[in-house]
Image (cartoon, rainbow, N blue to C red):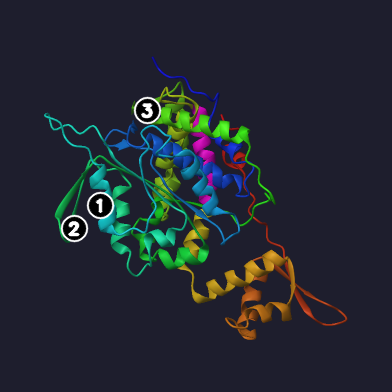
Amino acid sequence: MSIPRKLEGSWLKHYLDFTKGMESPEIFHFWVGISLIATALGRNVFLDRGYFKLYPNMFIILLAESEECAKSTAIKTGVNKIMRADEMEGCPMIFAQKATPQALVETLVDETGTPDADMIIDKNAEVYIAASELAVFLGKKEKNSELLTMLTDLYDCPDKWAYKTRYKGWEQVVNACLNVIAGTTPKWLKDTIPRDAIAGGFVSRLVFIYVNHTDRQFAHPVYTDVEEKLRLKLVHDLSLIRRIKGPFKWGQGSKEWYTIWYADNARKLRKSPDLYVRRKKDLVLKLAMCVSASKSSDKIITINDLRTGVNAVNKVEEYLPVAIALISSTTMGDDTRKVLEIIRRDLKIEHSSLLRRLWHVLDAKRLAEVILTLEEAGLVEVELDSESHKKSYNYIGKDRKVSSADLMGTIP
């Protein structure tokens, strides 16, 4: 007899209710919630895609300025409050330390099950990488190419994966499954991921969630018995999601709906030079599996689940160019970002005040070039006082204020 869930409707919606008293923007909590569901499902479920099985695992990166949107808080809340080994049944291995290829391989090998008499392994090698700072986990880009190659290989959840270590020789991982949730800032993103990782495919596997503003402010956050009771129900039901096993099936009309959507986007999917766009079709399905599992354990993908996936991925597409630009940015691009952040936070600042705050990194000539760039981009307006003849800079760009409703519409 199956154990009933304690929460009605969407687990994800209840998770957003649980985190509504936190300053991190709702969209961050939405994607942390998706990551928790994807990790709970792990390699236990899949969608049969003919020549391969598609698993719901994802590599999700929360991107914002330091202290701006409480990225680490959003990640740690999901990991420390919900996915706890002492409370959650079958909690997967959580890897949060600085990674080396050797350490990650050893962890995956330790998680690989022991074959029975028929050489069948019923335990998956599942690891949840939860890094509040991506740069700490990956290390500097000059030294992390081997680790990035490894993560790229493991993204597809290979049945068997071998790696040659320096001291132990060949190590084999069976039924691998990796999920990643990490946070980073624009500066650290550039210092962590090399440009060749874009062409190499690693970046195309990342889901970037870029936010530059949060309208949530709580001087004294309150955690009451109401939140604690909800937390316990979330842990209980995530344990039940962890128990779901087997293939997902197409619901009534959903396969036809996806076929039409795919055909409408086929030209872009085939011809776009952007590797991420080519993966869009699979990311939609990964999200649909997570949204379905959030509601029930029936393993049925509905049209609404697919619509939710398309909504979320369309919004994610808006963030990717920002991330790519940050990784590829020149020194001029870095200077432009620094100046824009100061003007954005102050909304209006005099030229002399801005120069005083930047004199150690920019001279007056470079600052003038940056301001011209921002002005032509429609992000900054230059104002000249008619009496004092002093220049001021006004921020006129639109901050990205995104809620879960923007991604999903009404959460099923």
- Please state which amino acid type lies under the numbered disc 1: Val
From mark 1 to mark 2, how far is it between C-alphas? Answer: 9 Å
Label 1 element class = helix
Residue ID at (73%, 81%): 352
Q: Is residue 369 above or below residue 326?
A: below
Q: Reply yes or no: does residue 312 show up in magenta.
A: yes
Estimate the spatial distance between the alpha carbons at disc 3 and disc 1, rounded to whole Å: 26 Å
Q: Position of residue 365 (x, y in %)?
A: 63, 85
Magenta-highlighted residues: 303-318
- Figure quadrant of the C terminus: top right
On residue 393, the disc is none
Mark 3 and mark 2 in contact (Cβ < 8 Å)?
no
Tag 2: amino acid: Thr
Separation of residues labelled 2 and 3 (CA atoms): 34 Å
The location of residue 216, given as percent across then percent down, is: 67, 49
What residue is shown with label 1? 105
Residue wearing tag 3? 243
Label 3 crowding class (10 Å Cα cut-off): few <14, some 14-19, many 20+? some
